[in-house]
Amino acid sequence: MIDFFVSIGSAIMTPLYYVISFVLVGFHNVFGDLFGPTSGLAWVLSIIGLTLVVRAALIPLFVKQIKSSRNMQLIQPKVRELQKKYGHDRERLAQETMKLYKDSGTNPFASCLPILLQMPIFLALFRILDQAARNPETKRGLMTPELNEQLSAAVFAGGKISDTFLNADGVEVRVLAAVLVLAMTLTTFLTQRQLMSKNMPADALSGPYAQQQKMLLYVLPVVFAVGGIAFPVGVLFYWTTSNLWTMAQQFYVIRNNPAPGTPAFKAKEDRDRAKAAKKGIAIEPEATEAPVVTEVKQPRQQPQRQTKAQRNQKKKR
């Protein structure tokens, strides 16, 4: 049974080894010519280049994540109404909530997609770096024994980029790894805090979605801090660069396309008014609807009924 799962894992990861190593080696061919094939800077820049390629490929998923997160914020009042109405019936509450998600085009798991899709890439890079340090003569993907030797010997800021905080021989590697773990943790915290403080409406800060975001605000940095000490320095460069990309990407979206009813939305409106005033464009207040005048119709008067004698008298006149 174990061999079966190992073979399945190998079948999944082997194509990734080739894809990741193809991009990594491609960047190394460029930076290796500039700084030398065994230069730590060349390998660090190659890993950063790999990160940028991966994150650029995930932009469509990020856009989907932003739309889904925005929809989740906007439907929170309706979710709370359902909880009040069906709180005694969990099965009915789940059915109505899923129906609400479907009708509003919301996927509650969309926010996890970028992280989940990066995990196999992260693992593939980890295995490539670990292989270069432990068993450089074994080929993995396009990483030949010669490239493994160069990667294993690469030194950046006094530490080998294939070493980890736990197995490092010198203090330089531990200092470098600690700085990267701190940067990785800090960027994760700031990104999550930026989302909650600027791009969530006030009425969404008390629902279950807000509680989930608050939990992630503190849980994710702890996970990265604890797990980071076991990752090679090269993997820490990948994850820190990815976090910086996420933070910058989210800042751009929140600034230019914020969710309605949030502090970021109000700030954007204020900036737009200031720009318009600077250009001399007067911003007119919203036009109010003209009062509707309803025509009062006079009731139709029915002709009085007359006798035959009265009608004959009128004819004589």
Image (tube, grey):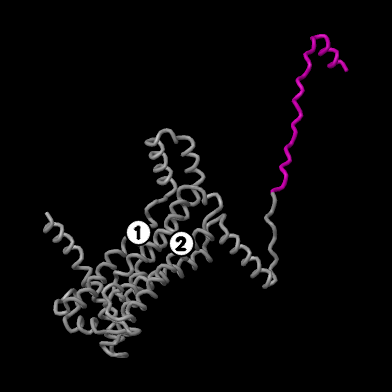
Which residue is pictured at 39% across the width and 40% down the height?
Answer: 94
Q: Quadrant of the N terminus?
A: bottom left
Q: CA distance from mark 1 to mark 2?
A: 16 Å
Q: Nearer the viewer, residue 100 or 225?
A: 225
Q: Is residue 14 left or right of residue 283?
A: left
Is residue 37 shown above or below 232? below
Neighbor class of circle 1 (other Cα within 10 Å; few <14, some 14-19, many 20+) is some
The reply to whether residue 226 is in sight is: yes
Q: How many marks?
A: 2
The reply to whether residue 56 is in sight is: no
Question: Given the image, on which type of amino acid does mark 2 rest?
Answer: Gln
**Segment colored magenta:** 289-317
Is residue 263 shown above or below 84? below
Tell me the number on the disc at residue 113. 1
| Quadrant of res 265 | bottom right
Which residue is pictured at 16% across the width and 64% down the height?
Answer: 10
| Quadrant of res 232 | bottom left
Of labels 1 and 2, earlier in sequence is: 1
Residue under pointer 2: 192
Give the residue at the far right of this rendering: 317
Residue 21: percent from left, percent from top: 24, 75
Neighbor class of circle 2 (other Cα within 10 Å; few <14, some 14-19, many 20+) is some
Q: Quadrant of the C terminus?
A: top right
**Magenta residue check for 109:** no
| Quadrant of res 273 | bottom right
Residue 199: percent from left, percent from top: 52, 59
Question: Given the image, on which type of amino acid does mark 1 rest?
Answer: Leu
Residue 275: percent from left, percent from top: 64, 70
